[in-house]
Amino acid sequence: MSELSSHFEFGRNWSSYAGLIDEERVAEAVRGLERLAGPGGLAGKTFLDIGCGSGLHSLAALRLGAARIVAIDLDPHSVATTRQVLERYTAEAAEQSGGQSDKPWEVREVSVFDLPSQNLGQFDVVYAWGSLHHTGDMYKAWRTAAGMVAPGGTLNVALYRKTRLCWLWTIEKFLYTHSPRWVQKCLRAVFICAMRLAFLVTGRDFQKYRDDYAKSFRGMDYEHDVHDWMGGYPYESVSPRQADAFRQELGFETVRNFVLNRTPVGIFGSGNDEFVWRRPRS
């Protein structure tokens, strides 16, 4: 499903979020990406960012020494936002160093399904954090992303964990995506109130959770993530067992996985499992 009209307006949400990006959020994004890539895992590497969103993690890859970055997204708002973020921080880095602005990156408005026709070559690191499950055909997108990995390179993906309530969230996301904005605002208020109540009942500090959100979730923002979660349509999910079966089918090797230690019920979302796989050199 590569038609933008069928998708939630991810790009507008990311454009709004980009105004919050600062050095603290960039540092958290760098830490999150380094956790996946490993220490020094991007230095001198080529990096493909599939579903670049705000551009924050392409920027993190730049900070970690990637030699070439290609960021793609189907949504023109995401493409424009990513360009603005990378331009801004590239220019600032050049100004601070007193040198000229290098631009080892490019941003393209393209669907993951059209990547084979883009003549981009293969990449040392292919990164798709929270994007493939919103394409409308997750496994086809996943296979296409894997095809962009160079021999010896890695595929880094994060995907929604399958829960008992995924069917319900699929319906909710479809309805939310096709609702007026005032309805969406009301639904978000209900979700946040319910979450606040759940924290109260279980003795947790909801305000601290919100205050520490960027540190806990890769530089993200709670309100923007609630909007993204509730409207994230198309929507698919996968269990760790299904993911590993697909890895074997692709012929990739496991480098590291960060998976939830239990299957969540899914009342307030499913969370993401993260998989880092390597394409064998031979």
Image: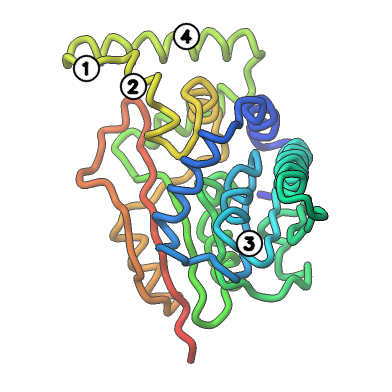
Judging depth in this view, the residue of 89 and 199 nearest the camera is 89
Judging depth in this view, the residue of 81 and 35 nearest the camera is 35
Residue 282 can be seen in this image:
yes
Up-down relation of residue 189 to residue 234 (above or below):
above
Residue located at (65% from left, 44% from top): 55
Disc 1 residue crowd, few under 14, some 14–19, many 20+, Cα 10 Å: few
- Of the residues shown, which amino acid type is indicated by label 1? Arg
Which tag, 2 or 1, sits closer to the chain's start? 1
Judging depth in this view, the residue of 187 and 70 nearest the camera is 70
Disc 3 residue crowd, few under 14, some 14–19, many 20+, Cα 10 Å: many
Residue 4 can be seen in this image:
no
Which tag, 3 or 1, sits closer to the chain's start? 3
The reply to whether callout 3 and callout 2 are in contact (CB within 8 Å) is: no
- Of the residues shown, which amino acid type is indicated by label 4? Ala
Which tag, 4 or 1, sits closer to the chain's start? 4
Tag 3 secondary structure: strand
- Of the residues shown, which amino acid type is indicated by label 2? Tyr
Tag 2 secondary structure: helix
Tag 1 secondary structure: loop
Disc 4 residue crowd, few under 14, some 14–19, many 20+, Cα 10 Å: few
- Find the residue positioned furthest to the front: 98
The reply to whether callout 4 and callout 2 are in contact (CB within 8 Å) is: no
- Please give the residue where the numbered disc 1 appears in the rendered image: 204
- Please give the residue where the numbered disc 2 appears in the rendered image: 209
The reply to whether callout 2 and callout 1 are in contact (CB within 8 Å) is: yes
Determine the CA span between mark 2 and mark 1.
8 Å
Residue located at (77% from left, 50% from top): 98
Tag 4 secondary structure: helix
Q: Residue 216 location, x and y as percent?
A: 37, 34
Which tag, 3 or 4, sits closer to the chain's start? 3
- Please give the residue where the numbered disc 4 appears in the rendered image: 189
Which tag, 4 or 2, sits closer to the chain's start? 4
